[in-house]
Amino acid sequence: MTGGILADVSRALLDLLLPQRCAGCDAPGEPFCGPCLAGLVAPARRLPEPRPAGLPDCWSAADYAGPVRRALIAYKERARVALAAPLAEALACTVAAGVAGRPHPAAAGFVLVPVPSARRTRRARGHDPVGRLAARAAGLLTACGHAARSDAVLAPIRPVADQAGLDARRRAANLAGSLGVAGRATPALPVVLVDDLVTTGATLSEAARALRSRGAEVLFAATVAATRRRS
């Protein structure tokens, strides 16, 4: 086994052995309890304002607030991988809503393409949170009758500065040209971009640019949550 697989197995065992508390409200019993989950599954179009150039239509499961915010932080930064199940369910519902909301649904199928983390971020976290969500969501969508699969074709091709504290204009400049489809075949099927969170939309715009530059059709973007930030 590689170190990454061993780390995933260790976290999964800890999730099973340690007493479970809801990441959203700290109630005992489940990684994410029923009342908190109810607030997570509310798929809707949520776009940042102003909308950056090149940003595809954006759908998200919920606002980035309260229990949803706490759950995403616990999943990404504290590696509570048991939360992948409810978060992926919310993401799959959001993708299904986005596909149904299009005038010409992708009947032939579509590919979920996760937005990659910077390499240093992935090393620090010890896991690939968005890639895991995309893979699980594709499996759920397939089980529900959609011709869906996931493919991590995007990769960082240059380093970027920390995004924290940057406004929309500076985020866009920081990310410009940072992603590529180097060394991989561009998906032949239409693409749904997947990320955990949309804030200014700069990251999703860059991801869409990279895919379109290789001839891919980007249907829309789907995220677990969207901030209410306006910048």
Image (tube, rainbow, N blue to C red):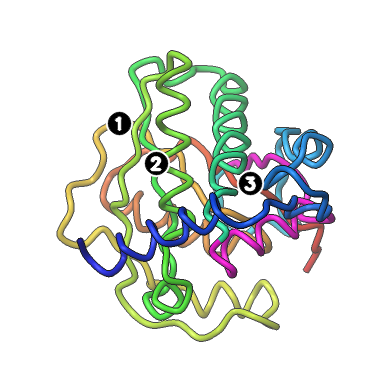
**Furthest residue toward bottom:** 161
Identity, as a three-letter code, of the amino acid under mark 3? Val
Which residue is pictured at 59% across the width and 59% down the height?
Answer: 75
Judge by depth and name the residue closer to the eye, 200 or 137. Answer: 137
Task: State how far apart marks 2 and 3 are (Cα).
Answer: 14 Å
Q: Quadrant of residue 186?
A: top left
Q: Residue at x 37, y 75 (%)?
A: 119
User: Element under label 1?
Assistant: loop
Magenta span includes 36: no
Q: Nearer the viewer, mark 3 or mark 1?
A: 3
Find the distance from the CA under tag 3 to the CA under tag 1: 23 Å
Residue under numbered circle 1? 189
Quadrant housing the C terminus: bottom right
Q: Residues within 10 Å of mark 2 (few under 14, many from 20)?
A: some
At horizontal 62% and vertical 25% (from top left) the residue drawn is 97
Q: Quadrant of residue 103?
A: top right
Q: Position of residue 77 (x, y in %)?
A: 58, 69
Q: Which residue is mark 3?
A: 224
Q: Position of residue 173 (x, y in %)?
A: 53, 78
Question: Can you tell which of label 2 and label 1 is closer to the viewer?
Answer: 2
- Looking at the rendering, the stretch of residues picked out in magenta corresponds to 57-79
- The picture places residue 69, in percent across and down from the top left corner, at 75, 58
Amino acid found under the numbered disc labelled 2: Ala
In the depicted structure, whether residue 134 falls above or below residue 4: above
Front-most of residues 111 and 220: 111
Mark 2 vs 3, N-terminal side = 2
Does 178 sit left or right of 61 as displayed? left
Going from N to C along the chain, the mark reached first, 3 or 1, is 1
- In the displayed structure, does residue 175 sit left or right of residue 63? left
Name the residue: 26% across, 58% down. Answer: 181
The answer to whether 39 is drawn above or below residue 68 in the figure is above
Q: Which residue is mark 2?
A: 135
